[in-house]
Image (cartoon, helix red, strand yellow):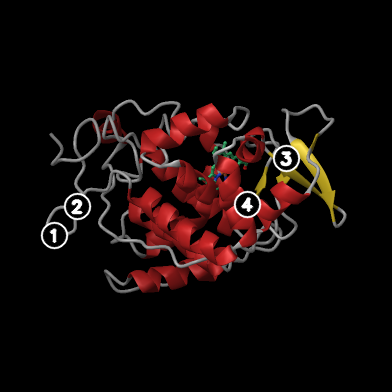
Amino acid sequence: MSSVPKGDYDGIRAEVKKILKRPGYDDGSIGPVLVRLAWHASGTYSAKEKNGGSNGAGMRFAPESSDGANAGLEFAREFIDPIHAANPWISYADLWTLAGATAVEAMGGPKIPWKPGRTDFASEVAATEYRGNIDNRLPDAALGAQHIRDVFYRMGFNDQEIVALSGAHNLGRCHADRSGFDGPWVVNPIRFSNQYFKLLLTRKWVPRKWDGPFQYEAIVAGTRLMMLPTDIALIEDPVFRPWVEKYAADQALLFKDFAAAFGKLLELGVDRDGTGVAHLVKGGGCPFAA
Ligand code: HEM
């Protein structure tokens, strides 16, 4: 792991790219779990309560670190810790979000707009004091369209952005020992593309017969692929479905819309002052909000 000059974020991107390949771990890349870390770090945001979001890097501490929804993300945090150790000038909050953005790009996806400036909670005590109550804000894969809307509208996303963001399930897999669900969504889960949307529309997804939680399956090219109940909700809902169809037909449109929506996700709750620093405020949220 190399040290790069303070403020050299392209240098950090290069460091992240160096560690993505990991034979023996899942499908040979830690990229997908880094994308999930960036998403779960950011996806606690509430536009109304003006708290949650990536600023603070609260997942280093309980209760976020031990939230069942974040099971497995300790691996992602450990994988990128050496980059922080070599470059302590970058905040964890910036590093986690930049690593997720870099991973998407490195796996063949679009360039994600990203800006630095996030600040870390100084300690668990500070996190508790500043963060506010952000429990149970991440989505539950066993539920349906209404729940998806409740969660993503709370962050400030619309239906089109929800479908675009869901395209991230082209990456990685579910782990029975993390979420309870099992398997990848696509045949090549370390390459970003619009396969997820194509498969949603073209395969017959049937309930998997097994002891685990309710999920769907289809055998594609000899590989057992999966869909979560929330994934299938995207083709059953009359407003989500046309966006699934658009993204299945037009990968360039998906890349453009995914980059915008993922970039917006990473920015939620990150309110910078004139010098570009996003300060932490008690209860979370924006220091300039009324
Ligand atoms: C994995 C649920 C939205 C990115 C997972 C897993 C679940 C899940 C249950 C499996 C975790 C495991 O067992 O390791 C959901 C639900 C969503 C949602 C219910 C919304 C309704 C998103 C979004 C993104 C995302 C918006 C990013 C933009 C990922 C990635 C993985 C993943 C990359 C694979 C992680 C790995 O391979 O370790 N998701 N997710 N998800 N999710 Fe989502």
The residue at 29%/28% (across/down) is 132
Q: How far, Cα to Cα, is label 1 from label 4? A: 43 Å
Q: Which mark is residue 21?
A: none
Report which residue position mark 2 lands on: 272
**Residue 59, how many percent across, how many down?**
41, 40
Q: How far, Cα to Cα, is label 2 from label 1? A: 7 Å
User: Which amino acid, by three-letter code, is at mark 3?
Assistant: Asp
Q: Left or right of 44: which side holds 21?
A: right
Report which residue position mark 1 lands on: 275
Report which residue position mark 4 lands on: 245
Does the closest atom of ligand 1 sit within 8 Å of the Cβ of label 3? yes
* Circle 1: element type: loop
User: Which amino acid, by three-letter code, is at mark 4?
Assistant: Glu
Q: Which sits earlier in the primary sequence, circle 4 or circle 3?
A: 3
Of circles 1 and 4, which is in front?
A: 4
Q: How far, Cα to Cα, is label 4 from label 3? A: 25 Å
Report which residue position mark 3 lands on: 182
